[in-house]
Amino acid sequence: MGDALAAARGYPADRVQRVPSASVVRTPASPADISMDGSRTAAALGLQPRPFAEALGLIFDQSPA
């Protein structure tokens, strides 16, 4: 996620500090796999979600109205 955000903002990838997820203290404790699969929800609602990097590009490329 950090790499995609850096790319969307035009920052160098080496500015992203990588840390193991196990080093982050979370309360309450999170399961080992916290990835999200929204395919069943998307199918049920008839949605076609945008890829994360594409959505970031749309967010940051928008001009103030």
Image (cartoon, rainbow, N blue to C red):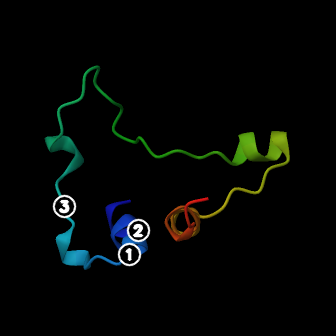
Tell me how far mark 2 sits from mark 1, CA to CA: 5 Å
Mark 3 vs mark 2: give the one in front.
Answer: 2
- Identify residue for label 2: 4
Determine whether the residue tagged by mark 2 lies in a helix, strand or loop.
helix
Circles 2, 1 touching at the beta carbon (< 8 Å):
yes
Asked which quadrant contains residue 15, the reply is bottom left
The picture places residue 55, in percent across and down from the top left corner, at: 58, 62
Local packing at callout 3 (Cα closer than 10 Å; few below 14, some 14-19, many 20+) is few
Tell me how far mark 3 sits from mark 1, CA to CA: 15 Å
- Identify residue for label 1: 7
- Identify residue for label 3: 18
* Residue toward you, 2 or 28: 2
* Residue toward you, 62 or 14: 62
Mark 3 vs mark 1: give the one in front.
Answer: 1
Q: Quadrant of the N terminus?
A: bottom left
Asked which quadrant contains residue 25, the reply is top left
- Which residue type carries mark 3? Arg
Local packing at callout 1 (Cα closer than 10 Å; few below 14, some 14-19, many 20+) is some
Say which residue appears at 18% left-offset and 76% top-offset.
14
- Which residue type carries mark 1? Ala
The picture places residue 65, in percent across and down from the top left corner, at: 61, 59
Say which residue appears at 29% left-offset and 20% top-offset.
28
Instruction: Please tell me which of labels 3 and 2 falls first in the chain.
Output: 2
